[in-house]
Amino acid sequence: MIPGSPAEEHRSIAGTFGERVRGVTDWDAPSPVADWRARDVVRHLVEWFPAFLADGSDVRLPAGPSVDDDPVAAWEHQAAAVQSVLDDPAQADVTFAHPRLPAMPLPQAVSRFYTGDVFMHTWDLARATGQDDSLDAERCQQM
């Protein structure tokens, strides 16, 4: 079972995804997502979320390494930056107000939209690279 708070949940799910990232030996391996390679799975997670977060809050994630140059470093930078936001007590009461979504607490938005995406794409990266593709069954049922 995955821990319950958004910070604990992200730490666990991002940690599992990070294990898969560090286990990749062929970044050009095709993934189950049409037209994506293993590298593109990481690229998706690293590139879409900073703008989404900025559109609904004052939080700005620092730019990290390029996925093209170093996908492992890019992922580790992203995971640490998001974890820092979730671990910051001052962010707990911030309202995420994206123009296309109902307002919600920032940690809930991260959990709902980003951590859930990391969870699902763990399977894609694992399948693309021949790694363990098992996912937490309880979390799967919640989604």
Image: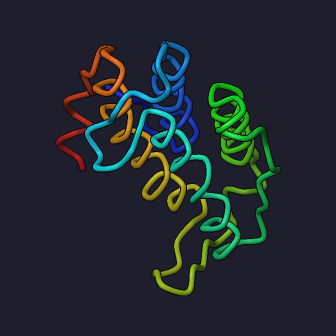
Q: Quadrant of residue 91?
A: bottom right
Q: Residue at x 73, y 35 (%)?
A: 77
Q: Residue at x 82, y 50 (%)?
A: 62
**How many numbered dots are placed on residues in this image?**
0
Residue 87 lies, in percent from the top left, at 70, 40
- Compared with 68, 114 (above or below) is below
Percent coordinates x, y for residue 15 in the rendering: 53, 24
Colour mapping: rainbow
Occupied quadrant, residue 20:
top left
Residue 71, percent across and down?
A: 63, 31
Q: Position of residue 3 (x, y in %)?
A: 43, 30
Quadrant in the rendering for residue 95 = bottom right
110, above or below 115, in the image: below
Quadrant containing the N terminus is top left
Q: Identify the residue at image location x=33%, y=14%.
A: 131
Residue placed farthest to the right in the image?
62
- Residue at (52, 44) in percent of width and height: 6
- Nearest the eye: 7 or 22: 22
